[in-house]
Amino acid sequence: MRERFLEAGKIVRAHGVRGELCLEPWADSAEFLRQVKDFYFDRLGTRPAGLLSSRPHKGRLLVTLRGVDSVGKADALRGRVLYLDREDIQLEEGRYFLQDLIGLRVVDGRTGQEYGRLAEVLNTPANDVYRVVQGEKEYLFPAVPHMIQETSLEGGVIRVLPIPGIFDGDGEEA
């Protein structure tokens, strides 16, 4: 079952003297988080943060929360993780929350051979990389569009089109 409330990012510092907070987004971009209606202080969504405004700034999201109106109050929230309600977000076709991909079976789109389960998505400058684990073996797979045949959350599978050598041999020891 997919979690309704997902990590949006971490408060890294105060911005200015009026309590505005600088949020490091754990999403594609700060602009992506602009569609969030409110953030939450817990993963159950029982403690709304009281979002008053947000704006992108130098790759981060500056947020103003109800009751946070000074540097001291803002500094007290440093290091806190904010959560979002997935129902606030409209994802484009072919886009997924990373949390939903973890645990999916990774299968060859041509042969049906199973390579393991997606354990982690690594963000690199060129592209995301899937860390696929099967028992003691682990493989790194570049998550580029022409090598991903299908991603099916409902089916619990990612069908890939690997180039020769990626899944050959013993893999790296975990």
Image (tube, rainbow, N blue to C red):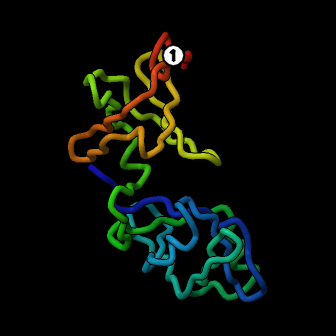
Going by the image, does 86 lie left or right of 58? left
Residue 48 occupies quadrant = bottom left
Q: Residue at coordinates 28% horizontally, 37% vertically from top-left?
A: 157
**Residue at numbered disc 1:** 171
Mark 1, residues whose alpha carbon is within 10 Å: few (<14), some, or many (≥20)?
some
170 versus 94 height, above or below:
above
In the image: residue 71, left or right of residue 103: right
Task: Count numbered badges in the picture.
Answer: 1
On the rendered structure, is 5 left or right of 130? left
**Residue at the image point whose x is 58% and y is 70% from the top:** 30
Q: Quadrant of residue 5?
A: bottom left
Secondary structure found at label 1: loop
Residue shown at the point (41%, 38%) measured from the top left: 147
Q: Residue at x 55, y 15 (%)?
A: 173
Residue 12, percent from left and from top: 70, 65
Name, please, the residue furthest toward the top. Answer: 169
Height in image: 30 above or below 3?
below
Relative placement, left or right, of 110 versus 133 is left
